[in-house]
C-alpha cells in the first residue's frame, strides 16, 4: 500500500493560541484512520487545516504533492474531500441539486449520472426525497446527504468530522456500516469521532488527540483493548 | 382621478417598475453571492444609455476608455496578488481574463462601429462594452476586502458610486441623452393606448427574469451560484470558487442593468448621474423582497414603479419623497417579521 496523505509537524493557531501542536499522521491508500479524543482536543481544527479552511504550519502531502499552500478548491479538485461537522448542506436547494453540486469539481462529467445512481443505491432514502429541500430532512438523512454529496466528487481521501454527532443509535450503526463499505471502493478515510468505540471498531489505525497533541497511536484493534483508553474514552473500567 | 387616468398611470408604473425590477434582480444576485450591496448598479444602467446614445451619434463612447483603464488597473492588482501568493503559473489566465478579453471587447466594438452598424448591432455593442465594468470593479475594489463586514462593503459601494459619477462626468460629459425609440408600434388595450416601447420594457423584463430562472435551475454554473449564496463554506468544500462565482454574478448583474439602461434611454433623459435614483429605487424594491428573493425583488420593484407613477401624478415634486418614505414602514414590517421567525426557530 502506498501513502495517500500525511501531515508532518502540523501546527494550527487561532490568533496566538496553538489549537493543534506538531501533529504528524499518515494514511495509506484504502485505509480507514481515526482520530479520537475529548471535546476541544483540536480534532475539528485538524481537519479544517487539512482541507485548507484554516492556515497551518508544517508539511502536508497528498498523493506525493505538497498541498500545504493550496486553496480549499484546489485540494477538492485533487479529490480530497471533507464532510464537516455542521454538514454545510445547501438547505434551500433540493437533495438532487445538493448531490449534483457534489460533483462540481469533476472535470470529466461523463460518469456523473452513474455516480448519482450509485449514491441513490447506497442511500435509497435520498432517492425518495430527491425533490425535497435539504433543510427539511431529518438529522440522519442530512448526514446521508452530506456523505452522498462527498461521494459525488469521487474522493480519494474522505475526511469525516463527527459523522455520528446528534444521531440516533440505529442511524449511527447505519452510517458506520456505510463508512466501512467505502473501503471496498478504494476510498481512504480520515475519521474524526467522539464515539471512540464505534470509530475504533471501523478503523484500521487510530490516533489519540489530547489538548492539540497526539498522545498515543496504534492499530485500532490494539487501541480498543488498551486499558487506559477504555477508562478514558470507551466507557469501561 | 378617473379610471382612464388610473389605467394610464398603472401601465406607466408597470413599465418603470419593470426597469427597476431588472436592476433589483441584479442587486439581489450580487448581494446573495458576494454580500455586496452594489449601489453603482444604477450607474451601470445610466452608462449603458449614454454608451448607446454615443454609438447612435456615431461617436466612440467614453465607456471604451473606462474599460481600458479599469482592465489595466485590475490586471496590475491581479499580477501583484499572484506574485505575493507565489502563484506565477496563473499569470497567463489572469492576463487573458483581466486584460486581453476586455481589450478585445473594446477593440471589436471600435472596429464594428467604423462600419456604421444598424441599431440591433449597436445595442449588442453597448451591452458588450458595459458588461466588463462591474466584474473589473469587483476585482479592483471588492475582492481585496471580500471578507469584510456587510457594512464595510456597503460603505465602499457608496464611495464607488460617487467615484463612478465623477468618471461618468469625465468620460460622457454633462449633457443628457435620450435615444431613439426601439419601436414605433403601439396598440390599444381596454381603451388605453400602450406604446410599443412600454410593451418592450415589460416583455424584456419578463424574458430576462425567465432566462435567469432557467439559468439558476437548469445549469450547473447557475446552481453553483445559488449554492454560494446559500452556504459559502459548503460551496467552497464542493470546489466552487467564491471569486469566480462573484465574477459571474457581476457579469450577469451588469447585463441586467445594461438591458434596463437600454430600455429606459428612449423614455427618460439620462445624464451621467441619473443612475443613483434608478439604483436606489431598485434597491427599495429589493428590500421589499428581503434582499434574497428574486420574485420578491421583482414584485417589490414593480410596486415601487406603480407607486412612483401615481405619486408623480399627485405631486411631481414629492414623488421621490413618497417612494423613499415607503422604506420606513417596510423596514419596520420586515424587522418585526424576522423577529417573529427567529422566535419560532428558538421554539
Image (tube, coloured by chain):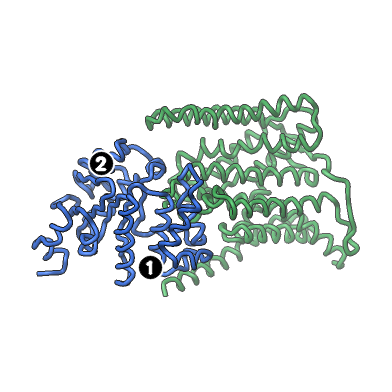
Chain colours: A blue, B green
Q: Residues within 10 Å of mark 2 (few under 14, many from 20)?
A: few
Mark 2 or 1, nearer chain start: 2
Q: Position of residue A45 (x, y in %)?
A: 28, 51
Q: Please, is residue A49 above or below residue B325 in the view? A: above
Foreground pick, A151 / B93? A151
Q: Quadrant of the N terminus of chain B?
A: bottom right
Q: Quadrant of the C terminus of chain B?
A: bottom left
Secondary element at tag 1: helix
- Left or right of residue B243, residue B329 in this image: right
Image point 51% across, 37% down: which residue?
B139
Image point 12% across, 64% down: which residue?
A230
Q: Chain of mark 1?
A: A
Q: Position of residue A20 (x, y in %)?
A: 22, 48
Residue that carries the numbered disc 1 in the rendered image: A140
| Labels 2, 1: one chain | yes
Secondary element at tag 2: loop
Q: Please, is residue A225 above or below residue B145 in the view? A: below
Image point 9% across, 69% down: which residue?
A237
Q: Chain of mark 2?
A: A
Q: Residues within 10 Å of mark 1 (few under 14, many from 20)?
A: many
- Left or right of residue A58, residue B111 in this image: right
How far apart marks 2 and 1 lie (CA) works out to: 34 Å
Looking at this view, name the residue that lies furthest to the bottom.
Answer: B347
Image point 75% across, 27% down: which residue?
B113
Q: Please, is residue A186 above or below residue A172 in the view? A: above
Foreground pick, B88 / A134? A134
* Of the two numbered discs 2 and 1 in the rendering, the one whose residue sits closer to the viewer: 2
Residue that carries the numbered disc 2 in the rendered image: A2
Amino acid at each position: 500500500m502506498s501513502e495517500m496523505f500525511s501531515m508532518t509537524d502540523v501546527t494550527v493557531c487561532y490568533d496566538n493560541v496553538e489549537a493543534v501542536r506538531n501533529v504528524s499522521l499518515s494514511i495509506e491508500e484504502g485505509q480507514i484512520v481515526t482520530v479520537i479524543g475529548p471535546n476541544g482536543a483540536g480534532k475539528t481544527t485538524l481537519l479544517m487545516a487539512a482541507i485548507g479552511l484554516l492556515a497551518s504550519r508544517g508539511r502536508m502531502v497528498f498523493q506525493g504533492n505538497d498541498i500545504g499552500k493550496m486553496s480549499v478548491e484546489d485540494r477538492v479538485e485533487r479529490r480530497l474531500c471533507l464532510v464537516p461537522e455542521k454538514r454545510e448542506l445547501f438547505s434551500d436547494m433540493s437533495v438532487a441539486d445538493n448531490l449534483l453540486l457534489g460533483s462540481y469539481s469533476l472535470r470529466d462529467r461523463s460518469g456523473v449520472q452513474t455516480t448519482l445512481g450509485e449514491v441513490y443505491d447506497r442511500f435509497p432514502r435520498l432517492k425518495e426525497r430527491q425533490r425535497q429541500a435539504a433543510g427539511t430532512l431529518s438529522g440522519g438523512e442530512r448526514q446521508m446527504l452530506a456523505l452522498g454529496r462527498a461521494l459525488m466528487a469521487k474522493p480519494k481521501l474522505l475526511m469525516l468530522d463527527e459523522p455520528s454527532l446528534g444521531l440516533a443509535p440505529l442511524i449511527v450503526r447505519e452510517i458506520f456500516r456505510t463508512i466501512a463499505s467505502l473501503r471496498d471502493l478504494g476510498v481512504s478515510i480520515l475519521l474524526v469521532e467522539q464515539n471512540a468505540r464505534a470509530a475504533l471498531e471501523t478503523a484500521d489505525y487510530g490516533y489519540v488527540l489530547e489538548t492539540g497533541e497526539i498522545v498515543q497511536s496504534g492499530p485500532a484493534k490494539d487501541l480498543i483493548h488498551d486499558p487506559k483508553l477504555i477508562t478514558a474514552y470507551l466507557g469501561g473500567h | 382621478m378617473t379610471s382612464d387616468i388610473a389605467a394610464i398611470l398603472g401601465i406607466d408604473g408597470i413599465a418603470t417598475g419593470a426597469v427597476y425590477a431588472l436592476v433589483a434582480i441584479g442587486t439581489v444576485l450580487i448581494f446573495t453571492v458576494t454580500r455586496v450591496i452594489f449601489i453603482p448598479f444604477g450607474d451601470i444602467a445610466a452608462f449603458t444609455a449614454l454608451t448607446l446614445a454615443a454609438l447612435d451619434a456615431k461617436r466612440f463612447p467614453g465607456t471604451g476608455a473606462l474599460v481600458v483603464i479599469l482592465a489595466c488597473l485590475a490586471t496590475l492588482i491581479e499580477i501583484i496578488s499572484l506574485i505575493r501568493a507565489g502563484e506565477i503559473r496563473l499569470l497567463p489566465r489572469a492576463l487573458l481574463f483581466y486584460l486581453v478579453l476586455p481589450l478585445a471587447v473594446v477593440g471589436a466594438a471600435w472596429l464594428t462601429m467604423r462600419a456604421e452598424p444598424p441599431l440591433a448591432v449597436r445595442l449588442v455593442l453597448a451591452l458588450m462594452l458595459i458588461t466588463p465594468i462591474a466584474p473589473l470593479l469587483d476585482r479592483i475594489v471588492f475582492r481585496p476586502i471580500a471578507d469584510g463586514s456587510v457594512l464595510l462593503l456597503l460603505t465602499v459601494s457608496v464611495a464607488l458610486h460617487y467615484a463612478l459619477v465623477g468618471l461618468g462626468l469625465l468620460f460622457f460629459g454633462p449633457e443628457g441623452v435620450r435615444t431613439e425609440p426601439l419601436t414605433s408600434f403601439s396598440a390599444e388595450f381596454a381603451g388605453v393606448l400602450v406604446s410599443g416601447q412600454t410593451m418592450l420594457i415589460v416583455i424584456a423584463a419578463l424574458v430576462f427574469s425567465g432566462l435567469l430562472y432557467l439559468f439558476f435551475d437548469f445549469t450547473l454554473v447557475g446552481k453553483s451560484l445559488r449554492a454560494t449564496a446559500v452556504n459559502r463554506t459548503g460551496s467552497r468544500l464542493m470546489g466552487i470558487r467564491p471569486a469566480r462565482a462573484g465574477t459571474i454574478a457581476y457579469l450577469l448583474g451588469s447585463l441586467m442593468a445594461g438591458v434596463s439602461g437600454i430600455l429606459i434611454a428612449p423614455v427618460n433623459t439620462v445624464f451621467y448621474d441619473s443612475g443613483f435614483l434608478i439604483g436606489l429605487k431598485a434597491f427599495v424594491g429589493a428590500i421589499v423582497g428581503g434582499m434574497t428573493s428574486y420574485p420578491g425583488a421583482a414584485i417589490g420593484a414593480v410596486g415601487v414603479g406603480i407607486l412612483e407613477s401615481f405619486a408623480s401624478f399627485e405631486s411631481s415634486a414629492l414623488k421621490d419623497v413618497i417612494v423613499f418614505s415607503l422604506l420606513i414602514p417596510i423596514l419596520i414590517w420586515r424587522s418585526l417579521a424576522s423577529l417573529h421567525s427567529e422566535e419560532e426557530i428558538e421554539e
